[in-house]
Image: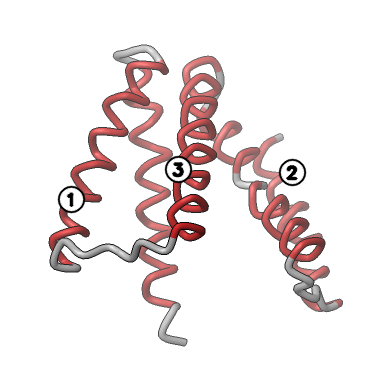
Amino acid sequence: MNWLPAAIFSLLAFGLWGFFSKLTVQHIDARSALIFQTLGVVITGFATLGMIHFRPATDSRGVALAILTGIAYGLGCLLYFIAAKNGKVTTVVTLTALYPLVTIALSSALLNEVITLRQWSGIVLALVAILLMAI
């Protein structure tokens, strides 16, 4: 369970991110918001780099996958900003909260992770909750 505190703080951080995103696009356009958000990510990256004494792991496959992760994240953020600018943030954040379904499907198909009946039940309940929130 040593992963739980990090997951809870991640939930809080992403909750703040979703809220601050809406405030941001009320003042600047989505593309500019992405640029300044990226500056925030760079600041966080440099702080993290300091925590590991400026010696990041350099396995080429890991680095390439991390860059691909960053591209997917950046694209997702840009599209989120556009949606938040044009829609109600309560609906946009609820719909985009379905992203774990993509992760689950890919993990099951490509990493052979098994989804139990209990987990499928949780997925269905999460979908129902998200649909109720979005209406």
2 or 3: tag closer to the N-terminus: 3
Calculate the distance from the C-alpha at mark 2 to the C-alpha at mark 1.
39 Å
Residue 125 as seen in the image, left or right of residue 13 = right
**Mark 1 Cα within 10 Å, few/some/many (few <14, many 20+)?**
few
Is 86 situated above or below 6?
A: above
Q: Front-most of 133 and 62?
A: 62
Q: Front-most of 54 and 88?
A: 54
Which residue is at a point 65% across and 54% down the rendered structure image?
100
SS state under label 3: helix
Residue 89 as seen in the image, left or right of residue 2 = right
SS state under label 1: helix
Calculate the distance from the C-alpha at mark 2 to the C-alpha at mark 3.
28 Å
Quadrant in the picture for residue 49: bottom left
Which residue is at a point 22% across and 49% down the rendered structure image?
44
Residue at image mark 1: 46
Q: Nearer the viewer, mark 2 or mark 1?
A: 1
Is 63 situated above or below 132?
A: below
Q: Position of residue 8 (x, y in %)?
A: 41, 68
Residue at image mark 2: 131
Say which amino acid is labelled 2. Leu
Is 35 situated above or below 43?
A: above
Say which amino acid is labelled 1. Phe
Q: Position of residue 127 (x, y in %)?
A: 75, 52
Q: Position of residue 111 (x, y in %)?
A: 73, 68
In which quadrant of the rendered image does the C terminus lie? top right
Q: Are marks 1 and 3 in contact (CB under 8 Å)?
A: no
Q: Position of residue 3 (x, y in %)?
A: 44, 78
Q: Residue 70, labelled with which disc? A: 3
Say which amino acid is labelled 3. Gly
Which residue is at a point 80% across and 73% down the rendered structure image?
115
2 or 1: tag closer to the N-terminus: 1
